Amino acid sequence: MAKNTLISENKQTDIWNQNLSIPIPTLDIVIFTVYRGELCVVLLKNENNEYTLPGWIIAAGYSLEQNFDNILERKTGITGVYKEQLYTFWEVNRDKRGHTLSIAYYALVWVDKFLSAVDFTKVEIVKYDNLGEKQIWNKVTKVGFDHAEIISYANQRLKWKLEYTNVAKDMLWKSFRLSQLQEVYEIVLWKKLDKRNFQKKLMKLGIVQETGKLDKTTNRPAKLYEFVDEELKVYEVL
Amino acid sequence: MAKNTLISENKQTDIWNQNLSIPIPTLDIVIFTVYRGELCVVLLKNENNEYTLPGWIIAAGYSLEQNFDNILERKTGITGVYKEQLYTFWEVNRDKRGHTLSIAYYALVWVDKFLSAVDFTKVEIVKYDNLGEKQIWNKVTKVGFDHAEIISYANQRLKWKLEYTNVAKDMLWKSFRLSQLQEVYEIVLWKKLDKRNFQKKLMKLGIVQETGKLDKTTNRPAKLYEFVDEELKVYEVL
DNA sequence: GCAAAAGTGTTTGGTCTACACCCATGA
DNA sequence: TCATGGGTGTAGACCAAACACTTTTGC
């Protein structure tokens, strides 16, 4: 805990009362994970039973990375995830406490890691497809728009990344069967894929390679694969 | 002038002295135009002869749009351009005056409009390919990196947009010959294109259409074309 | 008549999609 | 022996790239 509480919440709450001439920069995080066969988002619930994205005021003197890690850990308990900046949102009336500016990130976390790290007293996990039924936070209309818009935007970006990068590595074990990888793709892209075409595409792009090992936990053993690159890599389609 | 000086510079300069616990949000603009057959960027020069992007502190109480328009007009004289948010950059030591956070935009402006609106006492126009020779602003190393990085990122985004959208409409007259459009593409993408393949792609995507008029200003008259959509549109490749 | 730019089709290779049957193993 | 999921190939449609000659006009 200690290492990541450099940035105190208290030091910052008085910011709201200063009537500044600049907007207050905040950082909001859309956390995705594949849980029980569905794409899910990790959300907080506020005093009005509205769902909100984990987020907080950005502290000067620390990098965006540090701010991100700190906010994520403080709000959810999770550490060390894949993250990517999405977009910076702005609305004069975005927050009734003052003018804010939200730098939105999305994060991907492998479900096992998520479950062992997350603090369920703080967060809820909500199926992406059920978001429509929830009250997502928006101060103006009190109807889902603002944070919901950010989540939807994050989902689009995630889909794009799946098609052209090895970002799926952050949602699986080190080694896996192709059918498990395909399942992740089908859940996120929200469509069925053809097994053979899927495998051909992976091989052509060179995203995964055989490990030489077999997974014997089902009837017929399956080859285990791993990602070729440890780091995020964009594979050109050409 | 009046309409766009809602936001005063003076009201904001004292921000630097308040030792805030939050970073100061600024907005920086990469302005592209095609000038004399080359892709160019509009820059300011600071007291140390370093080039900087037009930018300023973001004012609370105004939308990002309003802030953008105001900064662009105050710093360069230009109004009403195509704009798109790029990325939000952050570095603790980005600016020696304090911790800042830069929301970067890029803008496209048709050269004729640019020349009639721009205030050349404030800005310089620099060829994109010559940027390497210039000192681009960066407070830490005093060598081109920070703003240069933003410009390079903007250029990548612009190239992508040209391939998949009708964004080129913001760099040409209402009607034009296909060869003129192709020239813009070649300049921005920095490569030669095949005339027939280029035209086939435009027609297949349905980006442009014939106006029925001819341009007779060169030896052999050429058909004049126009963009099908007034608004920015992403054309799916399928 | 010549210089300058416009106009115009075809071929080829590659990539994407759709599609169905047999195999290895554990129970 | 049967149920489960693993493994494998081909044909057709579509798209992208390469490529060169003729036409219209002004001078």
Image (cartoon, coloured by chain):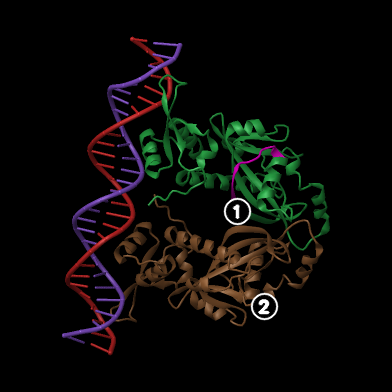
Chain colours: A green, B brown, C purple, D red
Chain under numbered label 1: A
According to the picture, the residue beneath numbered tag 2 turns out to be B47
Q: Nearer the viewer, residue B147 or A87?
A: B147
* Residue A54 visible within the image: no
The residue that label 1 is drawn on is A87
On the same chain, marks 1 and 2? The answer is no
Q: Position of residue B190 (x, y in %)?
A: 41, 67
Question: Residue at coordinates 70% horizontally, 41% vertically from top-left?
Answer: A73
Q: Residues within 10 Å of mark 2 (few under 14, many from 20)?
A: few
Residue at figure coordinates x 76%, y 68% from the top left: B12
Give me the residue at 62% from left, 35% from top.
Answer: A126
Q: Which residues are magenta?
A: A75-86
In the image, A59: left or right of A177? right
- Asked if D13 appears above or below A87 in the picture, the reply is above
Q: Which residue occupies the foreground of this view, A40 or B192?
A: B192
Q: Is residue B50 above or below residue B164?
A: below
Question: Residue D17 or B50: which is nearer the viewer?
Answer: B50
